[in-house]
Amino acid sequence: MLAADFVRFTTGSLIAHRLRSFLTALGIAVGIAAVILLTSIGEGLHRFVVSEFTQFGTHIIAVSPGRTQTHGGAPIGVFNTIRPLTIDDALALARAPHAQLTVPGVSGNAEVSVAGKSRRVMLSGIGHQFAEAFRIKVAAGEFLPDDDPRAARAFAVLGAKVARELFPAANPLGARIRVGGERYRVIGVMEPKGQVLGFDLDDTVYIPTGRALAMFNRESLMEVDVIYEPTAPLDEVVEGIRRILTARHGSEDFTITPQEKMLEVFGTVLDAITFAVAAIAGISLLVGGVGILTILTIAVAERTSEIGLLRAVGATQRAVLMIFLGEAALLAALGGAAGLALGLGISLALSFALPALPVHTPWSYAIAAELMAVAVGLAAGVLPARRAAKLDPLEALRSE
C-alpha cells in the first residue's frame, strides 16, 4: 500500500467521526496532562529542597547531642544524652582531620527593643565563623569578632528585617539594644537572605554562643556544624569527629549527620514520591486506552464492507492491520500532544499564580509522556486491528 493511501485511510475515519475522535483523544489528553502536572510539581519540589540545603555549601556535617538510633522498636533521641554538647566540644572539633571551620549554635526566641520599639525575633547564638561557613554576607559593619566564645563581649548583628524595623531611618551600627533584658552593641547588619527551610534569616539577631546559652539557661548546644575540605573522604572526616567526641564524652552519645547523606535520603524519597504520583496519574491513561479500544471496535463493525472491499482489491491482512493500528497511534499521539500543551500551560499558570509553589517540567518527562500515550494507543488498538485483518473478504462484502 502506498504511503499516501495509508495516510488517507488512517485519517479518513477519524475525520468522518470528529466528535467521537475528539472525545477519545480527550481521555488521553487528560491523562497526559495529569502526568505532566504532577511530575512537574514533584520535580520542582525536589529541586527546591536540594537548592535550600545546598545554598550554604554541601561539605557540611552536623553534630547534635544525643545518639539517634533504633532500639527495641523505639527511637532513642536526645533523651539518652549522657553529656551535653559544649563549646569546648566545638573547639575540640576544630582540630578534627580535614575540618576547616566549626560553628557552634543554639537558638530560640527573644524580645529585642530599642528606643521604645520592640519585637520578638529568632535569637541565634552562633560562632564567629558562621558568616564565612555558610556564605552569608554582611551588608554593613562586621560579623561577630573572634572572641573566646565562653566569655564573648556583648555584641549583636542584626538581620536585614530586624534592622529595618528597629531603625527605619537611622544607622544601627554602634547603637545599644536590649536583647532578652541585656544590653548589646550592634556591630553589623546582614544582607537580605529571605526564608530558608521555613526560617526567616532576615528576622534574626545573632549574638555570641556563650551568651545565648546563658540567656536560654541551657547547658548543651543544639548543634555544631563542621565544614570540611571538599576533597576530603567523607568517611574519614566522620570517623575523626566520632573519635574526638567519644574520647571527650566517654561514649558515643551524639549524632553525626553529613549533609551529603541527608541529601541522598531526601533525593530517594522525593524521587519515589514523584514516581508514585506519576503512576497514579498514569491510571487515567488506561481510561483513554479503553476509549481507543471502544472506538476502534465500533469502527471495525461499521466498516466491515470497506475492509472487505480493500481485501478484494488486493490489500493484505498486514495492510489492514497497519491501517487500524495507525488510527490508534494517531488518536493517541494527538491526544498526547494536546495533553502536553494542557499540562505545560497549567504548570506555567501555577508558577505565575503561586510563585512559592516550585514547578519544573523536564523535557525528558514530556517526551516520555508522549511516547507513553502512543504506546497506550497501540496496545489498545491491537485487538480491533487483528479482528479487522482476519475478516473474510467475501463475508465482509456480503455485510453491505
Image (tube, rainbow, N blue to C red):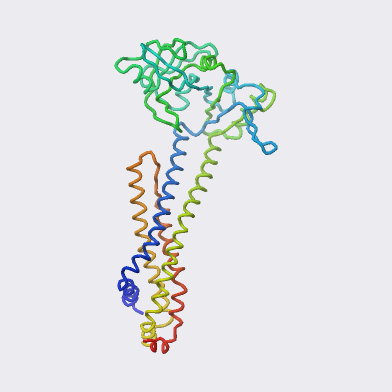
Looking at the image, which is closer to me, 250 or 75? 75
Image coordinates of residue 91 in percent, x first then y, are 57, 19
Examine the image and state in which quarter residue 114 appears: top left
At horizontal 59% and vertical 20% (from top left) the residue drawn is 220
Looking at the image, which is closer to me, 240 or 51? 51
In which quadrant is the N terminus drawn? bottom left
Examine the image and state in which quarter residue 240 appears: top right
The image shows a total of numbered marks equal to: 0
Judge left or right: residue 75 versus residue 337: right
Q: Is residue 391 above or below residue 297?
A: below
Looking at the image, which is closer to me, 87 or 335? 335
Q: Is residue 40 above or below residue 316?
A: above
At horizontal 38% and vertical 66% (from top left) the residue drawn is 24
Image coordinates of residue 400 in percent, x first then y, are 36, 87
At horizontal 35% and vertical 20% (from top left) the residue drawn is 165
Image coordinates of residue 282 in percent, x first then y, are 46, 57
